[in-house]
Amino acid sequence: MTTGEPSFDNTEIAFRFRSNGDLRKAELLFRTFNFPWLVKNGPGMAAKAVDFGFKGLIKSTIFSHFCGGETIAECKPTIGLLWKHKVGTILDYSVEGEEQESVFEATCNEIIRTILEASGNEAIPFSVFKTTGIARFTLLEKVQKGNELNAAEKAEWEKVRERFIRICQAAHDHRVRLFVDAEETWIQEPIDRLAEEMMRRFNTERAIIYNTLQMYRHDRLAYLQRMLSETGFYQGYKLVRGAYMEKERQRAAEMGYQDPIQPDKAASDRDYDAALELCVSNIDRVSICAGTHNENSSLKLVGMMREAGLRPDDERIYFSQLLGMSDHISFNLSNAGFRVAKYVPYGPVKAVLPYLGRRAQENSGMAGQMGRELRLIRQEIQRRRG
Ligand SMILES: Cc1cc2nc3c(=O)[nH]c(=O)nc-3n(C[C@H](O)[C@H](O)[C@H](O)COP(=O)(O)OP(=O)(O)OC[C@H]3O[C@@H](n4cnc5c(N)ncnc54)[C@H](O)[C@@H]3O)c2cc1C
């Protein structure tokens, strides 16, 4: 590891954990994302392929690029490979869209298993969970609206709170930092309230519980300022731009309320960088993780750290990207001595398909950002050919 200014152009460093075979497979995969029909229908086709016994095909292609495995044990080679280059892992149990209490209980137990796995293991610096993994979406919606809950719903909500507290308590007891992921605005309020409560309860010696702020929301900078006016506990934030923009805009338009999303990308970028700045200037009591694939924001944070006289490996500042994306940011930052961890999603192949569909969409021509991953992969293949 060398310490210095990171450059994101170095593909040799970016892909040094990928074999030639991995890169050829990745090139083919990212090329398929240029076919809009395939991106749109891919998740449905993949689900059928799994049902008809072709799970192996999915598992050895798109799944193996973006996921660590189906279980924690299967993720271990990836954890080891990343850590060889001082890139940490955040085990992300990615089962989505479930509705039954028994599944919520099982997911809660699985999240606690990720915390136990991370305990005392420097290769796994954080755990993470989504509240919708342990709670019914429509219940969260009802709680946010402030509608009167019936007796059964009250009991159900109590169970959600218990699970939330159980997960945070485990993180605290095992000294593992924990991210609470951010979700849709119409269920985010109860998530924020729970995350704030857990921060006040458990972040007494350092930041253990981190809430997530989506800076594509025009109200989040004010929220952060409000939170920072509170003292008496450490605060932790994962800063992201936000993943549900189209859905948010569409719902607001259909239901006729003010769009919660910034007017344009420049405004999201401006607030993202302003939030980084605000946190760095309060670093004595705020810890952050910049969850972004944006090169500019990552470099800005590097500059802010330098100006504040912080070491690159300051425990309170992490950079994070998703497995299979933006390796040029992750590995070049870690090579320059910064703290970096990748989200490593895992879970049964079929359950992870919605996650994989989003990654395909994000890397497709449809998302208007076709090119970067594919260009970098091709550049490295070319470089290795000499
Ligand atoms: C480690 C990690 C954890 C994450 N956790 C979460 C999470 O908990 N919750 C969550 O919602 N997302 C999460 N994300 C996803 C994240 O919110 C973004 O969708 C994704 O990272 C792309 O944004 P970017 O910062 O990488 O950069 P860019 O590629 O520079 O930005 C793209 C983003 O900018 C915003 N944007 C684009 N166009 C416009 C526009 N016209 N107007 C306003 N805004 C616009 C959108 O948010 C879009 O996703 C996470 C991402 C990472 C890497």
Image: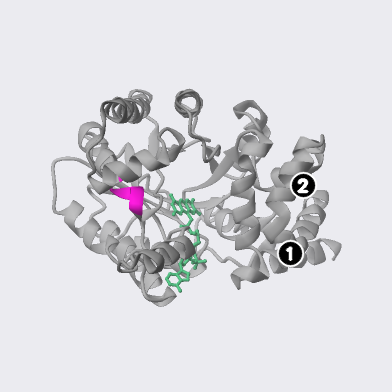
- SS assignment at label 1: helix
Is residue 125 covered in magenta? no
Report the quarter where the C terminus lies: bottom right
For disc 2, does the CB lie below 8 Å from ligand 1? no
Residue ID for mark 2 = 61
Q: CA distance from mark 1 to mark 2?
A: 18 Å
Quarter of image, res 216: bottom left
Q: Evaluate whether residue 130 shows in this view.
A: no
Is residue 188 covered in magenta? yes
Above or below, 243 against 60 in this view is below
Instruction: Looking at the picture, tell me which residue is in the foreground, 74 or 157.
Output: 157
- Give the amino acid at mark 2: Thr
Q: Evaluate whether residue 204 shows in this view.
A: yes
Question: Which colour assignment does the render follow?
Answer: one colour
The residue depicted at 34 percent of the width and 24 percent of the height is 166
Above or below, 58 against 169 in this view is below
- Give the amino acid at mark 1: Trp
The residue depicted at 46 percent of the width and 48 percent of the height is 339
Residue 132: percent from left, percent from top: 43, 39
Image: magenta residue range: 186-191
- Give the foreground label among 1 and 2: 1
Mark 1 or mark 2: whose residue is earlier in sequence: 1
| Image mark for residue 37 | 1
Above or below, 151 against 353 in this view is above
Instruction: Looking at the picture, tell me which residue is in the foreground, 302 or 63.
Output: 63
149 displayed left or right of 341: left
**Label 2: few (<14), some (14–19) or many (≥20) C-alpha neighbours in 10 Å:** some
172 displayed left or right of 233: right
